[in-house]
Image (cartoon, grey):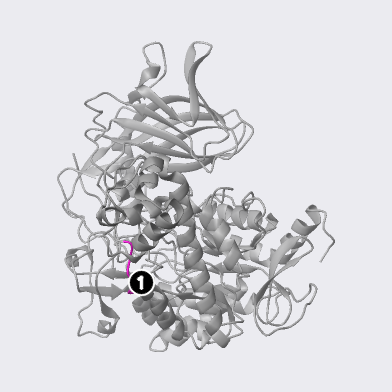
């Protein structure tokens, strides 16, 4: 058994003698182990019984290819998310000694398949998500994919309870001792697919490492300590040297020559100058028009702030090497936070935090670090061909009027539909007076941006838990009689059915009276009540969007309403999606957070023609000391750059999309933000150093931005702008 060493193969890219020796030792031990150890879960050969499978929205059959037998999956055209469930033995498999579950898969259909490969089905939703691997499979493509079921290819030989981060080294992602199923599904499958699946197996036996010496695992700069990689900050001299080198680069590369004052296309056609941003369809393609009248495409990044790497220290002091005292010159970078949305700190009240981003900026620039951060950040974005500060960007940075920004209105303190649920919390009771009251209070704080020509538009909230069509209506019925939404629903049913007996007949229910129905919290048979559930769900959506639209425009009549950043169930944009259709009626621009590998084919429901802004996307890798890739995986930093450029190029070819906003500007800390996210998603690392492979591709597409959009219009056969 290995004692913990400070370098290990997956994250070791340093060039020091100690790092090289440590890595060679570990590789020699790995080479001494068997390389063919694996556990076959499903090989679909003669002993395989098709009865252990269940297809939802898909037909399954076995086919023979020479001496090999494989599973053929044919999805139905009308299935939004067809899936294949493969059940394991009743006692489950013990996969606790493996790092991967692999699968061979081929797309023999005619359409790109967006695959979700999931091992097990933990009750905890976060663990369940961690056990998924998502990828795109093109027609004719065959891939061997690996779903990692431990965060690192090694595990601690005895428990080391590391808390407060999504991916902790040396730990499994869930209890692996009784994995009883594997699931393969296709997202957004509005076209038929044909897939061939084979050889599902657990592979890569883990190594066990003695945890002695692992703590602390974060250095004084907030970086992962037990790895080396190109560009890692090893001293304050490194920070200052990069500061000076970047200053020369930014001086020599100030930005695209065709950008106007606001980043609009000054070499393109010019329209009426209204002094504000507005959406505009020109030559068959949607755009924004900037305050000067130039066509504008929003190439942006979210969370541009000197606080990206704020992390909790309470209960975790042992994680940090050389954490400064509160009495030192770095004491001002300590702070406090309270309840967290998820993770270890949820419900724990007040905790101490430390801001590694700001403390590194102080080391880099000295006392004027804040002013220097603002100056350099604006210069970087312009040099990279970016023209938008996305959601949750620093208010002071936005107010300097050097880079256009989006503003976000958060509506707090409303009455919620009690039985509703969602990742970010329960849904507003939009029929309760508190919804409009709290919305007005929030909008009243936006007097400055309401008249600011640099404000591109307002997002009102983020990733609300709409659920699927009808779900909020069911939650309303499961809520108490005091719920205003429930009273509204029952009144609507009274008006429609007149008598409780007629409703009972339609729903197959047995309510004694309308009053008894109001008091009951039982939900009906969804199939029988479906028309009424969908009708009330739509009423919720109409009430929400119309209320927000009316209140927002009364405060900021010239600012575009950018929607509520739809995600999850509402991101498919199918013809049946009520939320998308309703949002299109009331919003100036539709917003979607689309964590995909491509949005080139994104469209809207039939009959809907509105511009779309992508509020979030990203790709992460594990080659620079990160412990979690985030939501979409890249193989390394160069691949992050390639994926970024491909994504934005695809968006530029899409006639609906008027902008993409990368999430986020700065990398998250290895010890996690408040809810534990510790993703490699930054354009810059926790030491404020740009990832060069990524930002070079950002710059490349940023400087070609308007030329690409022009070609999109030409390719559609539209007149040239």
Horizontal side of residue 576 vs 25, given as left or right = right
Quadrant for the N terminus, please: top left
- The single residue placed furthest to the right in the displayed view is 719
Q: How many labels does the image show?
A: 1
The image shows residue 633 at horizontal and vertical percentages of 46, 49
Vertical position of residue 623 compared to residue 185: above or below: below
Quadrant for the C terminus, please: bottom right
Horizontal side of residue 109 vs 369, given as left or right = right
Is residue 466 visible in the rendered image? The answer is no
Vertical position of residue 496 compared to residue 41: above or below: below
Determine if the magenta segment contains residue 415: yes
Vertical position of residue 115 compared to residue 294: above or below: above
Q: Which of the two residues, 211 or 292, is positioned nearer the viewer here?
A: 292
Assign a secondary structure to mark 1.
loop
Tell me the magenta residue range: 413-417
Q: Give the quarter of the image for residue 141.
A: top right
Q: Which of the two residues, 231 or 60, is positioned nearer the viewer here?
A: 60
Q: Residue tagged by mark 1? A: 235
Residue sitting at 68 percent across and 67 percent down?
703
Magenta stretch: dominant secondary structure: loop
Q: Residues within 10 Å of mark 1 (few under 14, many from 20)?
A: few
Horizontal side of residue 180 vs 497, given as left or right = left
Q: Which of the two residues, 666 or 489, is positioned nearer the viewer here?
A: 489
Horizontal side of residue 2 vs 8, given as left or right = left
Determine if the magenta segment contains residue 645: no
The image shows residue 616 at horizontal and vertical percentages of 50, 61
The image shows residue 122 at horizontal and vertical percentages of 28, 41
Residue sitting at 34 percent across and 43 percent down?
24
């Amino acid at each position: 058994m290995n004692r913990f060493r400070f370098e290990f193969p997956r994250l070791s890219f340093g060039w020091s003698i100690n790092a090289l020796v440590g890595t060679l030792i570990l590789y020699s031990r790995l080479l001494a182990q068997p390389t063919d150890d694996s556990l076959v879960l499903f090989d679909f050969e003669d002993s395989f019984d098709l009865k252990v499978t269940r297809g939802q929205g898909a037909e399954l059959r076995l086919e023979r290819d020479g001496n090999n037998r494989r599973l053929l999956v044919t999805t139905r055209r009308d299935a939004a998310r067809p899936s294949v469930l493969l059940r394991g033995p009743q006692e489950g498999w013990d996969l606790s000694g493996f790092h991967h579950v692999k699968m061979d898969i081929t797309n023999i259909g005619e359409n790109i398949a967006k695959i979700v490969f999931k091992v097990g089905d933990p009750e905890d939703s976060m663990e369940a998500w961690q056990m998924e691997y998502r990828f795109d499979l093109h027609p004719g493509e065959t891939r061997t994919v690996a779903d990692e079921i431990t965060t690192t290819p090694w595990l601690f030989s005895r428990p080391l309870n590391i808390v407060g981060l999504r991916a902790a080294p040396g730990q499994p992602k869930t209890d692996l001792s009784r994995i009883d199923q594997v699931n393969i599904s296709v997202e957004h499958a509005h076209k038929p697919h044909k897939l061939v699946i084979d050889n599902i197996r657990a592979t890569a036996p883990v190594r066990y490492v003695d945890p002695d010496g692992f703590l602390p695992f974060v250095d004084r700069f907030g970086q992962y300590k037990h790895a080396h990689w190109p560009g890692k900050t090893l001293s304050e001299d490194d920070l200052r040297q990069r500061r000076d080198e970047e200053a020369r680069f930014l001086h020599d590369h100030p930005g695209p020559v065709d950008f106007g004052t606001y980043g609009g296309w000054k070499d393109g056609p010019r329209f009426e100058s209204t002094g504000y941003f507005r959406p505009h369809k020109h030559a068959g393609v949607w755009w924004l028009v900037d305050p000067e009248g130039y066509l504008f495409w929003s190439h942006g990044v979210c969370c541009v702030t000197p606080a990206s790497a704020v992390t909790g220290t309470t209960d975790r002091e042992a994680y940090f090497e050389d954490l400064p005292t509160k009495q030192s010159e770095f004491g001002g970078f300590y702070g406090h936070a309270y309840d967290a949305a998820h993770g270890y700190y949820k419900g724990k009240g007040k905790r101490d935090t430390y801001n590694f981003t700001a403390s590194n900026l102080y080391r880099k620039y000295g006392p004027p670090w804040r002013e220097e951060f603002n100056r350099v950040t604006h210069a970087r974005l312009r040099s990279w061909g970016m023209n938008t500060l996305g959601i949750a960007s620093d208010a002071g940075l936005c107010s300097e009027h050097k880079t256009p920004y989006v503003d976000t209105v958060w509506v707090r303190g409303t009455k919620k539909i009690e039985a509703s649920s969602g990742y970010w919390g329960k849904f507003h009771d939009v029929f309760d007076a508190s919804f409009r009251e709290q919305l007005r209070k929030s909008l009243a704080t936006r007097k400055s941006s309401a008249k600011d020509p640099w404000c591109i538009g307002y997002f009102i909230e983020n990733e609300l838990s709409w659920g699927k069509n009808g779900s909020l209506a069911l939650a309303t019925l499961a809520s108490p009689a005091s719920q205003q939404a429930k009273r509204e629903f029952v009144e609507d049913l009274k008006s429609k059915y007149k008598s409780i007996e007629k409703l009972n007949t339609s729903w197959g229910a047995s309510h004694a009276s309308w009053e008894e129905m109001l008091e009951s919290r039982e939900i009906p048979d969804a199939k029988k009540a479906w028309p009424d559930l969908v009708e009330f769900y739509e009423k919720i959506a109409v009430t929400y969007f119309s209320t927000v639209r009316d209140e927002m425009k009364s405060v900021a009549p010239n600012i575009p309403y950018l929607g509520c950043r739809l995600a999850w169930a509402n991101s498919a944009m199918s013809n049946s999606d009520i939320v998308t259709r309703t949002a299109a009626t009331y919003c100036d621009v539709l917003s979607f957070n689309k964590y995909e590998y491509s949005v080139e084919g994104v469209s809207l429901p039939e009959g809907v023609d509105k511009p779309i802004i992508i509020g979030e996307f990203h790709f992460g890798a594990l080659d620079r000391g990160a412990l979690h890739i985030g939501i979409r995986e890249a193989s390394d930093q160069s691949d992050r750059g390639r994926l970024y450029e491909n994504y934005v190029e695809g968006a530029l070819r899409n006639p609906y999309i008027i902008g993409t906003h990368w999430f986020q500007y700065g990398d998250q800390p290895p010890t996690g933000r408040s809810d534990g996210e510790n993703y490699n998603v930054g354009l810059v690392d926790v030491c404020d150093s740009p990832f060069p492979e990524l930002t070079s591709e950002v710059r490349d597409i940023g400087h070609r931005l308007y030329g690409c959009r022009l070609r999109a219009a030409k390719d559609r056969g539209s007149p040239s702008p």
